[in-house]
Amino acid sequence: MSISPAGHEAGSTVRPNAETCRRAPLRTFLHTVDGVTIDSVYDPAAVVYEEGPPPADDLVFVVAHGFTGAADRPHVRRVAKAFTRYGAVVTFSFRGHGASGGRSTVGDREVLDLAAAVEWARGLGHTRVVTVGFSMGGSVVLRHAALYGPEYEGGTDAVVSVSGPARWYYRGTVLMRRVHWLVTRPEGRLVCRYGLRTRIHHRDWDPVPLSPVEAVPRIAPRPLLIVHGDRDGYFPVDHPRMLAAAAGEHGELWLEPGMGHAEHAAADELLHRIGRWAAAPVPGVARRAGI
């Protein structure tokens, strides 16, 4: 089920008029290089009448949700609304989730879904793309950035990974053991399909994809922000620390006191800090300056 960089030449087949679409919300189905349809939503930057700088016209956030999420889920819509204060936002449903086609490979071929969404965002005229991933999506944005350099239309300019794992097959918490049961057992996949509206592929990874911690060094020199809660019930804090150590000087780590896991636990204040980090001319400068 694994991918290779050979799929870099193509992504979305949808090419709407950029100037028209950037002024209004848009929904469409994108097509990945392996033929999966991906339900995708574009939200233009908000018109803001309050104090502070206006949203950046060139900036777009591409949001990669967590396992069992989807573009229409309330927590994903809340994330999108917060980021429109700083730029436009593309959300989408990974394969096997929501209205998208295919079946989930739980972080492997999902990089193709993200690449199609990023290419679509660039096709709408945005020149700065920041990918923001949560949990499973947090691992996908790291591998995507490692595989798709800035020279590719499906590449990103900065990366934010929230509540993501550092390594595969982690079973060190009760919640992750439950996730593994859902993914690997036939009865677990039935629960996912009918209870969680998520369709999971039955095949194991072959070969095993590049792990998040192995992907991180390949992202440099693009800026990387790693965000993790110190009360995350899925992945303890050794995961973000491993990722930050692998990133070195090109990475920044925010360990959030009292935060749990992924989109549900990301407070509005945190989302706005991430937005300011991304909107800075060099991501991270505004935050370090206390803006």
Image: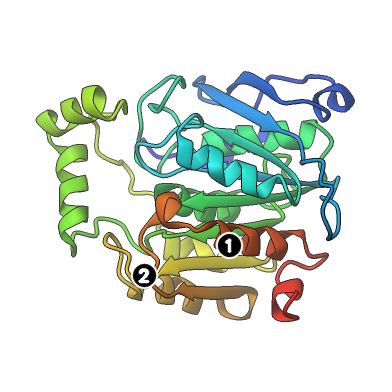
Above or below, 283 relative to 2: below
- The residue that disc 1 covers is 269
In this view, the residue in front, 206 or 268, is 268
Where, quadrant-wise, is the C terminus in this rendering?
Answer: bottom right
Q: Looking at the image, is mark 2 or mark 1 nearer the viewer?
A: 1
Above or below, 186 relative to 178: above
Which residue sits at x=89%, y=27%?
19
**Is residue 164 at all visible to an observer of this figure?**
yes
Where, quadrant-wise, is the N terminus in this rendering?
Answer: top left
- Measured as percent of width and height from the top left, residue 106 is found at 35, 41
Above or below, 258 relative to 34: below
For label 1, the crowd category at 10 Å Cα-Cα, with few meaning under 14, some 14 to 19 and many 20 or more, is: few
Q: Quarter-wise, where is residue 45 in the image?
A: top right
Mark closer to the chain start, 2 or 1: 2
Above or below, 130 relative to 223: above
For label 2, the crowd category at 10 Å Cα-Cα, with few meaning under 14, some 14 to 19 and many 20 or more, is: some
Q: Which SS class for mark 1? A: helix
